[in-house]
Image (tube, rainbow, N blue to C red):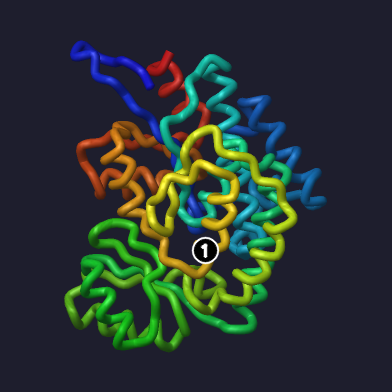
Amino acid sequence: MQITGDNQTETKRAFVFPGQGSQSVGMGQELYDSSRAARAVFQEADDILGVRLSKLIFQGPSRKLQDTVNSQPAIMTVSIAAWKAWEEFTGSELEPPAALAGHSLGEYTSMVVAGVVSFADGVTLVRQRGRLMQQASKGRPGGMAAILGLDELAASQICSETGVELANINSDDQIVISGDKIAVAQAMDLASARGARKTIPLTVSGAFHSSLMQAAKEGLSEALVSMDFQDPVAPIIANSDCAELRTGEQVREELVRGLCQCVQWRNTVRCMVDSGITQFVELGPASVLAGLIKRIDRGVQAVALSNPESIRKLAGATA
């Protein structure tokens, strides 16, 4: 929290973390080159996972990076590297964030930043999550698609008629559906016929955030039982119902619940705005969430920190 400008306006800052779809070959390279703290994150990920994840992130191939078993730990690693670079550039006296949130996979990143689990445990967990989701996809193949230009009510009606499910409510007019591949294709055709501005099949390996992930949910629940979760140092706003997660046990329950449930990103942002958040800072490979946040509420500031230049710029404004 800080006082800025001539009007002494109070800035209440939340940090947000992206999910799958934000990955690209070469992401995080500038962070690795410019920040000792960020470089240590990439090296730790390589050591913990026993694979050259950093080489895959920086050099590809893209096809391999897109596999959920790789993209999940890769995105978390880049996001945590950006967070550590932010800490390095701003110094240790920075106040803790007013709130944290993540889109799907990003919830796992937020719990690392909140001190619920270590980065080593977090990156190991999302690697396992990716493996479980990949296995579930082979057992029950499916797909996902984005629908642009229809509201939630219209999309829900299409889901009811085709058997697909709402996977992400990203903004008022950007909704992602998930389910059987044939049903998803039928839903896309129906959405176009009913006035959707655009329908986009997503390059994913399964029907994430749908009932087709039930087997992965069961496996994830078993994996989480043995993990020690600390209470977060800042509230994490849940994807599933926008509740404030303030205990380790609440975070554990949210992670299990979220695998098959719709990501309520629009409502998550609105809840944070209602609580007084005035600035959203996205830490990760791209600016997907910052763009969505600006569409959800034009009255708040949303910035993306994905490279040293953007981090230093905001750090300078904060100092």
Residue 291: horizontal and vertical position, in percent? 33, 46
- Residue displayed at 43% across by 45% down: 244
**Where's the C terminus, which quadrant?**
top left
Quadrant of the frame with the N terminus: top left
* SS type, badge 1: helix
* Residue drawn at the location 75% of the way across and 39% of the way down: 44
Three-letter amino acid code at the position of disc 1: Arg
Q: Is residue 27 visible?
A: no
216 sits to left or right of 15: right
The correct choice, above or below, for 84 with respect to 118 in the image is above
Left or right, residue 288 beside residue 300:
right
The answer to which quarter of the image holds residue 217 is bottom right
Query: Percent x, y for residue 110?
Result: 53, 43
Kindly identify the residue that appears in the image at 33 percent across and 37 percent down: 302
Which residue has dot 1 on it?
257
Side of 164 relative to 297 (left or right)? right
Side (left or right) of 27 relative to 190: right
Residue name at image x 68 percent, y 69 percent:
219
Q: Is residue 220 visible?
A: yes
The image quadrant of residue 169 is bottom left
Q: Nearer the viewer, residue 244 or 166?
A: 244
In the foreground, 107 or 245: 245
89 is higher (above) or lower (below) than 197: above
Tell me if mark 1 has few (under 14), some (14-19) or many (20+) residues whose alpha carbon lies within 10 angstroms of its own: some
Between residue 272 and residue 120, name the one nearer to us. Answer: 272
Q: Position of residue 101 (x, y in %)?
A: 45, 44
